[in-house]
Amino acid sequence: MNTASRLRSLLRQEGMIVAPGAYDSLTAKLIERAGFAALYMTGAGTAASLGFPDFGLVTMSEMAANAGRIAASVDLPLVADADTGYGNELNTVRTVREYEARGVAALHIEDQDFPKRCGHLDGKRIIPREDWLVKIRAASCARRDPSFTIIARTDARAVAGFDEAIARANAALAEGADMAFVEAPQSLEEIAAIPRLVAGPCLLNVVRGGKSPEIPLADGERLGYKLAIVPGLLVKTVIAACEEMLAELRASGRYPRPLKELSVREMFARVGADEWEALGERLSKATAAREAAQ
């Protein structure tokens, strides 16, 4: 069973899947090590890792390449940000094919105009509903594996209101999307209403300090959400930790006390050192056995 099929199986089960956000292979491995069942490639985090804000500055090929590295580094199903599909419906077809070929299990396509912005920033613009639905239809038809999950993200709440966002979500599901992602609801009442009003599985975006009120994950599950992504947790934690450590290093001239003590060996263990050493030993023994037999 590939990761797309495994994600589908998880989505059919009771409860809500929680997918923390990774922006590279290291953070992906830490998510897997922590015991989560799936992970999410954050577009904002990917942009930040390349030195850019989430202003639509990262290309499809850069996003697909990062998704491929993340997918190859773990065994978990990967849900990935695919922004606007990077153009019209033809570009969307290529985006789906590139992501799917790299082992991604699901992606989301949004209805923002290009250049897009982070869903929790001001100044967003959306395209006409039908133009977005053409992209959703194209994405649905483009997948080669029917298990590959298409998530329709609408940013209409901030621009055209809550009712339009719900209408777009339902229209996208009717056009072949597998899940709806109503971005940035602005109250607890709206968060609670989305799974009731949308005729299909819903995604909850957990963004601390964003436009939406923060709710416990258990509440999201109780409300009926099937998938929760937590995109900014690791990238913002890393930024804060790095700034703190660098400031202390510069001020004190000494290696700062780390947030958690890790030996060199323990650090490498986080990225598979034990498995690679075991593989090396097996290969060495196999080579030695062949040489002895000659």
Image: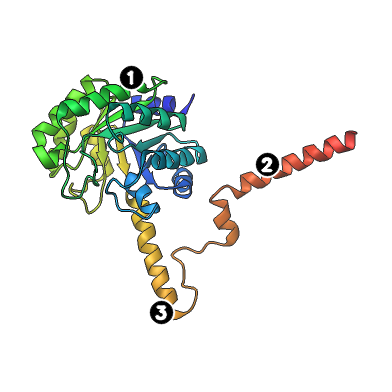
Q: Earlier in the sequence, mark 2 or mark 1?
A: 1
Task: Using residue 229 as the reference point, say whether residue 270 is left or right of it.
Answer: right
Three-letter amino acid code of the residue under disc 2 = Leu
Disc 1, SS: helix
Residue 48 x %, y %: 35, 53
The quarter of the image holding the C terminus is: top right
Three-letter amino acid code of the residue under disc 3 = Ala
Task: Using residue 150 as the reference point, say whether residue 209 is left or right of it.
Answer: left
Could you classify mark 1 by the number of other residues whose Cα lies within 10 Å: few (under 14), some (14-19), or many (20 or more)?
few
Viewer can see residue 182: yes
Q: Earlier in the sequence, mark 3 or mark 1?
A: 1
- Looking at the image, is 51 positioned above or below residue 275? below
Instruction: Specify the label residue 251 is tagged with.
Output: 3
Mark-to-mark CA distance, 3 and 1: 57 Å
Three-letter amino acid code of the residue under disc 1 = Cys
Could you classify mark 3 by the number of other residues whose Cα lies within 10 Å: few (under 14), some (14-19), or many (20 or more)?
few
For disc 1, the marked residue is 141
Mark-to-mark CA distance, 3 and 2: 43 Å
Q: Nearer the viewer, mark 3 or mark 2?
A: 3
Residue 242 x %, y %: 40, 64
Instruction: Specify the label residue 279 is tagged with.
Output: 2
Instruction: Specify the label residue 83 is tagged with.
Output: none
Task: Using residue 26 as the reference point, say whether residue 194 is left or right of it.
Answer: left
Q: Earlier in the sequence, mark 3 or mark 2?
A: 3
Disc 2, SS: helix
Give residue 167's quadrant in the image.
Answer: top left
Q: Nearer the viewer, mark 3 or mark 1?
A: 1
Residue 271 x %, y %: 54, 49
Residue 119 x %, y %: 22, 44
- Looking at the image, is 284 positioned above or below residue 194? below
